[in-house]
């Protein structure tokens, strides 16, 4: 792959760790994906598989004279950001895994860890500000894949919460006494519309779900988004992830109708749900956006 501009020499190492796949990329400061690799998330030896991917990306960067500014890592939660430790619900091998320490040893870069859905909202913000669009004062992104997560950006800053876990829309209750969730509760959005939840319901991969199943999933998402939107006063919501994007127009139309039906307050009249700008690459661009966000905010201190 050839580099097209001198500015592309400055780049971020981006890592997206999901329950279905692990992606590693090199993203330029101008938001170009210069390099990408992805593998299915293994059931065992996850770190070893990730380390091999990261090493390959670093080697590619060295061969192409890339100046890595930092490394951004998006991962499913929960996590303890202050300690750089993750315990993803869908990677059972990683229980209190010291991901940041291991990544720093491997890359010798500053490593910025965040929930993958927060990375997603930063990717959206980067897309809009780069294209000269005015980003709204508050925006939210939702990731619907192996799990369901969310990230909220207010006035250009991530909403963190007390422990850094703000935005977990996947654990909004959408059905009383509903499906049991991996978190231990019942009726969580994630327990009803995530890829594994849908696969259990239909007895086949979620990608094969019929029209009715896709509409039901979209309807539940819209219900949850309306609840969060009322709390946060947000009307701009983007959605990504393999399930949401794979379900397509049926899913998004159902989510939009449901959100408007459940959002009765006048300030939510313009509540809009749309696909993320970078589609399937959004989580990886989001991981780079984490690094970009950290570098820029550190420079303002």
Image: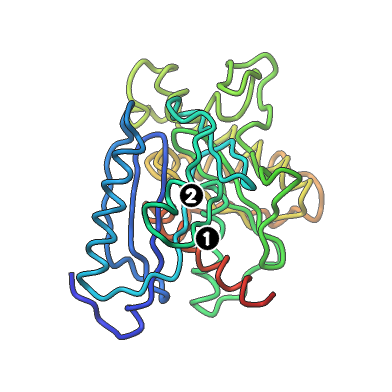
- The vertical placement of 194 against 167, above or below, is above
| Snapshot quadrant of residue 68 | bottom left
Which residue is situated farthest in the bottom direction here? 6
| Disc on the earlier residue, 1 or 2 | 2
Q: Is mark 1 on a helix, strand or loop?
A: helix
The percent coordinates of residue 111 (x first, y second) are 49, 57
Numbered-mark total: 2
Q: In this view, does 250 lie to the left or right of 295?
A: left
Q: Position of residue 32 (x, y in %)?
A: 35, 70
The C terminus lies in quadrant = bottom right
Residue in view at x 44 percent, y 33 percent = 146
**Crowd tier of the residue under label 1, counting other residues whose Cα lies within 10 Å: few below 14, some 14–19, many 20 or above:** many
**Frontmost residue, 54 versus 221:** 54
Q: How many residues crowd around disc 2 within 10 Å: few (fewer than 14), some, or many (20 or more)?
A: many
Q: Judge by depth and name the residue closer to the eye, 14 or 155.
A: 14
Q: Which residue matches tag 1?
A: 290
Q: Residue at x 68, y 32 (%)?
A: 172
Q: Residue at x 64, y 31 (%)?
A: 171
Q: Quick check: marks 1 and 2 in contact, CB under 8 Å?
A: yes
Side of 36 relative to 216 (left or right): left
Q: 9 above or below 168?
A: below
Residue 64 screen position, x and y as percent: 22, 73
Q: In which quarter of the image is residue 272?
A: bottom right
Q: Which colour scheme is used?
A: rainbow
- The CA distance from mark 1 to mark 2 is 8 Å
Residue 125 lies in quadrant: bottom right
Tell me the element at label 2: strand
Quickly name the residue at label 2.
Answer: 74
The one of 246 and 71 positioned closer to us in this rendering: 71
């Amino acid at each position: 792959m050839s580099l097209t501009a001198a500015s592309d020499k400055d780049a971020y190492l981006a890592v997206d760790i999901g329950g279905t796949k692990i992606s590693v990329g090199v993203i330029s400061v101008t938001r170009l994906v210069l390099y990408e690799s992805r593998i299915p998330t293994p059931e065992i030896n996850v770190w070893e598989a990730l380390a091999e991917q990261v090493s390959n990306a670093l080697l590619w960067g060295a061969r192409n004279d890339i100046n890595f500014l930092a490394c951004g890592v998006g991962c499913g939660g929960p996590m303890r950001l202050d300690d750089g430790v993750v315990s993803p619900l869908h990677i059972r091998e990683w229980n209190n895994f010291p991901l940041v320490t291991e990544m720093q040893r491997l890359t010798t870069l500053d490593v910025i860890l965040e929930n993958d859905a927060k990375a997603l909202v930063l990717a959206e913000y980067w897309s809009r500000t780069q294209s000269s669009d005015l980003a709204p004062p508050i925006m939210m992104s939702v990731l619907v894949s192996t799990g369901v997560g969310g990230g909220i950006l207010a006035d250009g800053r991530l909403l963190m919460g007390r422990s850094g876990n703000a935005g977990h829309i996947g654990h909004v209750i959408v059905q009383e006494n509903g499906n049991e969730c991996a978190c231990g509760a019942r009726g969580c959005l994630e327990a009803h519309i995530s890829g594994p939840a849908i696969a259990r319901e239909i007895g086949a991969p979620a990608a094969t779900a019929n029209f009715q199943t896709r509409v039901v999933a979209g309807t539940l998402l819209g219900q949850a988004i309306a609840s969060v939107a009322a709390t946060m006063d947000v009307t701009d919501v983007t959605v990504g992830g393999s399930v949401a994007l794979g379900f397509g127009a049926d899913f998004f139309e159902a989510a939009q109708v449901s959100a408007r039906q459940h959002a009765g307050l006048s300030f939510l009249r313009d509540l809009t749900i749309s696909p993320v700008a970078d589609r399937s690459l959004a989580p990886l661009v989001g991981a780079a956006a984490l690094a970009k966000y950290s570098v820029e905010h550190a420079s303002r201190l």
